[in-house]
Image (cartoon, helix red, strand yellow):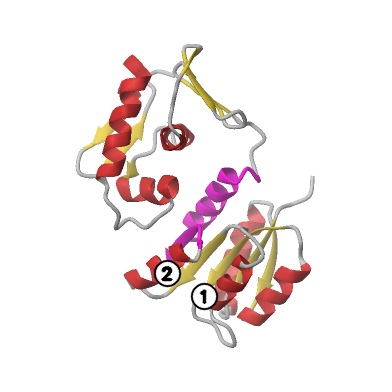
Amino acid sequence: MNKLKILVVDDERRMRKLVHDFLIKKDYEVLEAGDGEEALNIFYSQKELALIILDVMMPKMDGWEVCREIRKESRIPIIMLTARGDERDELLGFELGVDEYISKPFSPKILVARVEAILRRTNQIGDNQLLQAGGITIDKTAYTASVDDRMMELSFKEFELLTYFMENKGIALSREKILNNVWNYDYYGDARTIDTHVKKLRSKLGDKGEYIKTIWGMGYKFEVPQE
């Protein structure tokens, strides 16, 4: 099986090497570019890129310009890296169709985890499209969900939310993280959206609804006892 190709774009050689080394350990093929123009040249010549990690501040063309050009041609997943902590940058990133936004400095392990989460979400890794936990079954290919073999009628977002919970079983998830990954917009949105969907989802799950545990002041965790 061919390795998935990831393009890392950053004008700092040290940063590229750091990200490169962590991705190589996870068995990805890594291509590198030191500026925006080089990044676009690689993008146009490489038709099988799985994901792009793109720095904002670069010579010749910055990350926003590169992102705009890529989005004219492709919906390839893009993770933006920036040294800025400006909310406006994050909002611009989401407007341009950025899949994830990570501020420097960051943990390379966290970056790799985000890469793999996006690749799973876009069905580029993970052959198993069936999720099962505590009597709940999700078929990601058929977009169906069942509880104890009884089919559930879920809205699109309820299905996405349940899938996200089951893919992150046992992990505490903040409302901000859920908004970013399920609703795909920045966390300055209204977190009550999540609470409303969780309430409906718990109701549809019946007694299995107790698997979605509230973490007060933080978010939720999907946990199946003694599984």
Decide if residue 20 is on the left or right side of residue 200: right
Instruction: Look at the image and give the residue range highlighted in magenta.
Output: 97-124
* Residue picked out by circle 2: 92
Question: Could you say where residue 201 lies in the image, as x and y percent from the top left?
Answer: 35, 27
The foreground one among 163 and 108 is 163
The answer, for residue 37, to whether it is visible in the render is yes
Q: Decide which of tag 1 and tag 2 comes sooner along the chain.
A: 1
Three-letter code, disc 2: Leu
Residue sitting at x 33%, y 73%: 86
Where does the N terminus fall, quadrant-wise? top right
Question: Is residue 77 rendered magenta in the image?
Answer: no
Q: Secondary structure at mark 2?
A: helix
Q: Are marks 1 and 2 in contact (CB under 8 Å)?
A: yes
Left or right of 204, for residue 97: right
Question: On the picture, is 216 further left or further right than 127?
Answer: left
Q: Examine the rendering and report whether any part of residue 106 can be seen.
A: no
Please say if 187 is above or below 85: above
Q: Dot 1: few (<14), some (14–19), or many (≥20) neighbours within 10 Å?
A: many
Q: Amino acid at mark 1?
A: Trp
Image quadrant where residue 78 sits:
bottom right
Q: Residue at x 29, y 58 (%)?
A: 188
Q: Nearer the viewer, residue 125 or 205?
A: 205
Q: Which residue is mark 1?
A: 64
Along the horizontal axis of the image, is 102 left or right of 46? Answer: left
Outermost residue, bottom side:
60
At numbered mark 1, what does the secondary structure look like: helix, strand or loop?
Answer: helix
Residue 175 vs 105, above or below: the answer is above
Percent position of residue 71, x then y: 60, 66
The structure residue drawn at horizontal position 27% and vertical position 36%, both measured from the top left corner, is 196
Q: Position of residue 81 (x, y in %)?
A: 48, 69
**Residue 17 image-quadrant placement:** bottom right
